[in-house]
Structures are given as structure tokens and as C-alpha cells.
Image: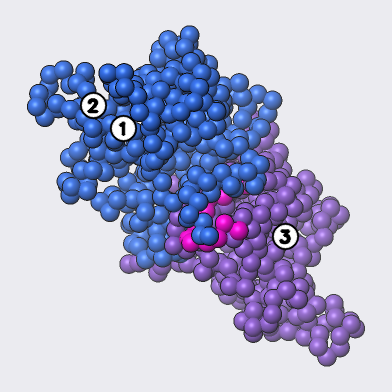
Chain colours: A blue, B purple
Amino acid sequence: MAIYELGETAIVARIVRRLDVEFEDCAILDLSETEYLVATTDMFHRETDFPHEMSAWQIGWMCAAGTLSDIAAMGARPSGLLVSMGIPDLTPAFVDSVVDGMDACARRCGTRVIGGDTDSHQELTICGTGLGRMPKDQILRRKGANVGDIVCVTGNLGMAGLGMAELEQKREPGGSAAINKLFEPIPRVEEGISLAESGAVTAMMDNSDGLSLSLHQLANVNCCGFEIMASALPVPPELRADADAAPGSGLDSAPASALALELALYAGGDFELLATVAPDRLGDATRVCELTAIGRVIDDGVFLKDCNGVTERIERKGYRSL
Amino acid sequence: MAIYELGETAIVARIVRRLDVEFEDCAILDLSETEYLVATTDMFHRETDFPHEMSAWQIGWMCAAGTLSDIAAMGARPSGLLVSMGIPDLTPAFVDSVVDGMDACARRCGTRVIGGDTDSHQELTICGTGLGRMPKDQILRRKGANVGDIVCVTGNLGMAGLGMAELEQKREPGGSAAINKLFEPIPRVEEGISLAESGAVTAMMDNSDGLSLSLHQLANVNCCGFEIMASALPVPPELRADADAAPGSGLDSAPASALALELALYAGGDFELLATVAPDRLGDATRVCELTAIGRVIDDGVFLKDCNGVTERIERKGYRSL
């Protein structure tokens, strides 16, 4: 059997079991009686992870963003980024731009690129490692959700997916907010820290593989289910059903189109935070961070409920490169 | 201009300047008033970094060893290893073995694989990230060597290079100590910690790219030079000039052959520590760690002195994959 047949989630689960480590966005290390170090590593490849339209600077930014989003998902404050690069036959200016983009994203998140390594490789391959620190009593893990908790997300869902759809339609990049979100996502570092400090969140992860996969992963870890309200999904205005028909009027309350739902549920690349919040603490969470409540934790199954009260299962699918 | 034309040292120097970071084996982060976190990342590729004869387990071991050797070079105690893997069409058993080899090396060095990431890639690519901690007042940097300091190394020099030469002669792996050293190097973690604690070392790095490149790098950082005594180089008994002629008799004092010198100076893969020691503290260093004094720090130039007192320049060459 080839390892591809397992699928990435199963491969990671296999390794996690083998090593007896936690299945979190970051590895967690004791720093002192009161503090954790969190650390995460992500590998990116030119062909599979970056649309051809991306600039070198955006490739660097994206690598840093993907790594720092994992730090944000724990509620930690980033304290450094390391980068390993396997470099094909590129110009020094291209490599400089990758490094600059990476450092710009790190600085946007209050940290820096602090070290790294290079070697030669036929395809540009970048491995980012993020480090962060946080008070032990504030750490937000994937595990911790309770039945009855409110499911919340930061920002919009489906915006990066829309950007990808626009690219596939050969729309010129640069002018579109969706493509911009896809190419230069801003990790929710400040939001993660605020939510951790609030003490209101019971479980958290990022949704970089898409909402559906993230919900299924949280369901697995917590032995719970989710009921998501279709009408509550914060799809961007560009994806509302009547966005073209009635621009500028009541867009925010218009129902999401089928495409919008598809992108909000299954497209990756948004790098938003997905959190479960104790119902009596929802005000404490929304006071410190802009959140949209999209559903609640239930006993079992991952469901979408439409405005007519009809529920259907949310498929376990999304962005996975393996 | 393609970036290859610069050479890896220049590429790294360029990035280091661009980011205004230190040029060390590890990045260094403040943990507290008294403690540093050190972190290092290394990328390895199946075709360029691992002889075909290596097993999956040995590939994993080697990745961990390369990363942990950088931790050892600072004198730090490892506190965790992260691994990102780009995986081609392999069997699950192969991937398991890589992970097992990596974890075995980590455990040999008192730590564990604590997290990671996988995705798909056409060539097996592994990025290891090592974390370590140490008292601030003990940290050993590349910078710090003074003229008159004694240059020392742990272990033998050229053993891994001999292993590589044996492989090229199609000698069967498994039976040879040299190939074993090449395939399963043991990072000098305990030695690094002991040397750091001794307070006798002024500068340190590992010699994984070969002694020559390491000396030239130390010379650059410290604006100094080195005079290395050919007769003092601890080449393994297998490489002594008359090893074949007079086995078992006086091998240790026999002069090194031309091949031995070549391998000791220019072959990579040994993962030994190269340290400069204050002359009045040499006893403190050798009391806690087996070391061979091979020369001294001078004002300028990197020279080899033979037993007749003739000196020649040591070329700046060695193992570099870019």
C-alpha cells in the first residue's frame, strides 16, 4: 500500500500515535511553572502550495502566515520564526523577496525571522517553524469543547476560496480583495491572544484546511458533534446570493448562495480561528474579539441547518495536499 | 545571475545580513533573565543528502542528528525536535521507520520528537527543527575566539568521509565502522553541555561541513586565523599511513596518510565539535570532555603545519550541497 492511500489526516494520526504526542496545531513544551513554549512547523512547495500568480514576496508572506496561524490557534504570542529553504535555480533577488515577505508577515505579527538554513533543491521548498510563548493557564487546545458550547469564527469564511475561484477564471490578480486575502492572509495572532486571555474559549484551532475539515477534527478530538447554522456563516458580501442583483442594499442579511456555502464550508486558505465558547461567557469573548457565532456543540455528527430547519451532514472534505 | 553562482555560504550570509540576525548554529531567544532558548532548522532531501544505501530508519536518524548537532554546538540541552516531511509515494512502513529513526536519535540525546507536519512531495524532503535551553552565562557562540586559544575537536576526523569513500568503492554497508559513523552519527550533546559548563571554551561550532569550512567560518566571524598541526589531527586508526602494513602496532602514533589528511580536513558528516579553548583553561575542558588539541588561534590565515614545520594554506572547501 502506498502512503497516499491513507490520506494526510490518517498519516499524521499514525505518526502522532507512534510518537505518543498531542494532536494540536503546535507542540507544547514546559518553559517554567507558569509558561509554555509552543512550536509548529509547516512545509510548503512551489507547485502544490502557491498559485503561479503569486509573487516571491507573497510566497514568503504565505509561508510565515501559515506557520504563525498555528501559533495564533493556541492563543500564544509569537516569539520567532525559523525558515529552511530548498532553492532551485532562482535569482538572488527572488530569494531576497521571499525572505522579505516572510519577515514582513512576521513583523506584522509582532515577531521576526530569527534564523534558518538553505540548500539546493529542484523545486522551491520552504519550511517555516514558528515559536510562541504563553501563560499555561490560558492555553487553548483543540480538546476542551463541551456540548452546548457556542461555535464561533473570526472574520469571513470562503474569501480565500473565492480568490482561488477567481484565479481559475483567469481573473487578473491584484485588483480583487478575495485574491488579496488568498495571497496575503493575516494570521489572527492578536485575536488568538485576546481570546486566550478572556478565559471564555474552551477549544480552538485555525481553519486553514477549510471549516468542514476543522469541524471534523474538533469533533474527533472532543468526541462531540456540531450543528452549524447556514444563515449564520459569515460569508463575504461578494458571495451573497443577490450581491449582483442588488448591490449596496441589505447584502449582509441576504442568504448565502450555494457557491458561497460550498466555499465557506470546504475551501481552505482563510486562516481564521475556529473556537468553541462557553455559552455563559460568549459576551466575554465577543468583547475582546470580533467573532461570529455559527452554531453549537452537540453530541454527535457534523450538521448544517438551513433557514427552514432542514439539516444535512457536512461532508468531511476540504483542502489537503496529500 | 542564478543564486547557485553565489554558493551557499554567501547565500546564507546575504540572508543573515538582510534580516540582521546572528550567524550561529542556532537562533538564540531570551527565555528569562538567566536562560536562553536555542532553535535550529535543517532541510534534507533524499537524493542530495542521503546515500542510497541508507535505510529509512537511518535517514530519520541522520535528520535528527544533523539538527541536534547544531543544538550541541551551542552547548545547549535539547528540549524537543519537530519534523516536517514532504512524502512521495512510499509505504507507510517506510515513513514509520523514518519517524522511528528520528525519535531514536532524539531519545539518544535526551529528548523526543514532539510534533510536525506532513504533505506530499515528489522527493522525500525532511525538515528538522531542534529546540534547546541553556543558562545564558554558558552559551557558546561561534564568536569569541582569541589569538592564542587552543583549537580542539571531539572524536575523530575523517571517519564519515572514509565511510563515503568506502560506499563509492561499493563496499557493502553494515560491516564498516566508518559507514556506521556516516549513517548514524551521534551528536555530541553531552560533550557540548559539559564544555559549556566548564567555562573554558571561547567559541564553538560543529564540523558537519568538514573541518576546513568550519575553520574558515570561525576565522571569518572572529577576524582571526588558525594554525593546525597535521600530526595532531585525530584521524581514525583505519586511516593511518601504515595501518595495513603493521596492523595492531603503534597505529595511533603513525603519521596520517595523504588520504587521511584530505578526509580529515575536507570531508563532511563527522558531526564533531570544534572549540577554541583559553590556553590556561585547557585542563578544565579536557577534564570534562575527551578532546584533541589540533592547533591554535593566530592573527590571520588558515594554515596546516606538517611535522617538518612546513606550513601551507588550508583551502576553503568542503561539504556543501549548494
Mark 1 surroundings: few (<14), some (14-19) or many (≥20) residues within 10 A: many
Position of residue B93 relative to residue B309, above or below, is: above
**Residue B309 seen from this side:** no
Question: Going by the picture, which residue comes out furthest to the left?
Answer: A245
Q: Residue at x 73, y 84 (%)?
A: B257
Position of residue B127 relative to residue A210, above or below, is: below
Residue A95 or B211: which is nearer the viewer?
A95
For label 3, the residue is: B186
Q: Residue at x 69, y 41 (%)?
A: B134
Residue B98 is labelled as: none
Residue A244 or B5: which is nearer the viewer?
A244
**Which quadrant would residue A153 be assigned to in this image?**
top left
Label 2, label 1: how many angstroms apart (C-alpha)?
9 Å
Label 3, label 2: how many angstroms apart (C-alpha)?
58 Å
Asked whether, in this view, residue A135 is left or right of residue B284, the answer is left
Question: Going by the picture, which residue comes out furthest to the bottom?
Answer: B245
**Which quadrant would residue A64 be assigned to in this image?**
top left
Asked if the residue at tag 2 contacts the one at tag 3, i.e. Cβ–Cβ closer than 8 Å, the answer is: no
Give amino acid for label 3.
Ile
Please give the range of residues in magenta.
B81-93
**Which quadrant would residue A290 be assigned to in this image?**
top left
For label 1, the residue is: A264
SS label for mark 1: helix
Magenta stretch holds residue A308: no
Give amino acid for label 1.
Ala
> Where in the figure is residue A70, as x and y percent of width and height?
48, 36
For label 2, the residue is: A256
